[in-house]
Image: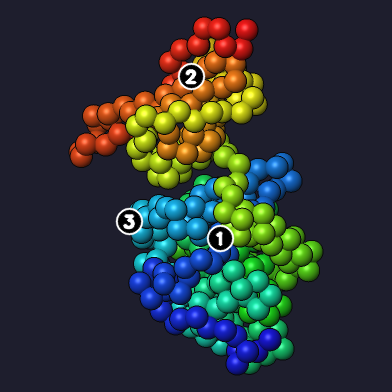
Amino acid sequence: MNERQWKVLTTARPGEPEWHAAHKGKLGSRDVASLLRDADGKRIGRRSPADLWMTLTEKSKPEDISKDPAVMRGIALEPVLLELYARECGETVTPYPGLIENPDLPCVAVSADALVGMDTARPGAVEGKTINPRYRSQWETEGVPDLARVQGETIMWTLGLPRCVFVAYGLDRDEILSIEHDANPDARQMIGEAVTEFFEKYVKRDICPPAEVDDLAVFKRLYPSHVPGPVHQLSANWEIELARKFELAKIATSAEKEIEAINARILEEMKGAEYAQTPGGIVIRARVEPRHYEAKPAHTIYPRVIRKVKGVGG
């Protein structure tokens, strides 16, 4: 695919209002990584599938990370990093081409930081990365991390390019590290299958993906307050889930993440109701707890078992 065949949605820079409007309802290259797992079964991307689903279906706005120090530093250093690479690589570096829609998966749109060698037989994308000093050795010894690799594969697929050059700058050294990565057909197939399944199974059917360990905050955004009065009837499988929650509550703090995952799934199941009840008679209430340490009044909602109904479930 050459540049004339690209479907450019906007030339606005990432983060600008026009870019956000054009990106609405689409997955970016980083988002795609959240649908894939590494060899150990760990999610590669930072956002959970449930978080992506809520954004794509407009049930919640994504977390605003524009003021995050690491994000701000990366945005500020990126032009300088690309300029340094352009001086050293000996090839023509073309500026940011815009937000481009994937020709095979219209639900995916990517923004490459720059392009390189577009006048040669091996054109490529360029991705600039500012890396924490403690991660630099990982880049040097193990190569491109999985998150960046998936991002690069998605960009290469979308733009029809055979390579992606990752240009990394560690804040502890006055030099850049560049690693060239060739497109992998197997990775492309894996990405395509994961994205297609996610949209067909969850987004198009408006069904939330299963909650994961870091989803409690996600569902608090979806259900910021409970609906007074209604009691949501829980299915029988929640007897096992809640029994597991009670068991975990007695264990040390290492179990807190799993408890949060169960709480997130309960809040998802309750769908805003104040109360819920299992077939065995366990009644749950979504309790509101003030958080006094914040500058402005705020509340945390989490499910709390309030009683076991007598005469129900034996």
Q: Which mark, by number, is residue 283? A: 2
Residue 93 screen position, x and y as percent: 54, 84
Counting other residues with Cα less than 10 Å from the Cα at mark 3, is it few (<14), some (14-19), or many (20 or more)? few
Counting other residues with Cα less than 10 Å from the Cα at mark 2, is it few (<14), some (14-19), or many (20 or more)? many
Q: Is residue 9 above or below residue 139?
A: below
Q: What distance separates the C-alpha of mark 1 from that of mark 2?
A: 40 Å
Residue 178 screen position, x and y as percent: 59, 68
- Name which residue type carries label 1: Arg
Q: Earlier in the sequence, mark 2 or mark 3?
A: 3
Q: Which mark, by number, is residue 293? A: none
Contact? badges 3 and 1 (CB < 8 Å): no
- Name which residue type carries label 2: Val
Report the residue marked by disc 3: 67
| Callout 2: SS | strand
Q: Which residue: 65% across, 71% down? A: 105
**Residue 50 visible in the snapshot:** yes
Counting other residues with Cα less than 10 Å from the Cα at mark 1, is it few (<14), some (14-19), or many (20 or more)? many
- Name which residue type carries label 3: Lys
For the C terminus, the image quarter is: top right
Residue 187 screen position, x and y as percent: 74, 63
Q: Is residue 287 left or right of residue 9?
A: left
Label 1 vs label 2, nearer the camera: 2
Q: Which residue: 45% across, 63% down? A: 174
**Residue 247 visible in the snapshot:** no
Q: Which residue: 53% across, 17% down? A: 282
Q: Which residue: 47% across, 68% down? A: 24
Q: In this view, does 184 lie above or below 103?
A: above
Please say which color scheme the image uses. rainbow
Q: Which of marks 1 and 2 is nearer the N terminus?
A: 1
Q: In this view, does 103 lie to the left or right of 79?
A: right
Q: Which mark, by number, is residue 30? A: 1
Q: Which of marks 3 and 1 is nearer the N terminus?
A: 1
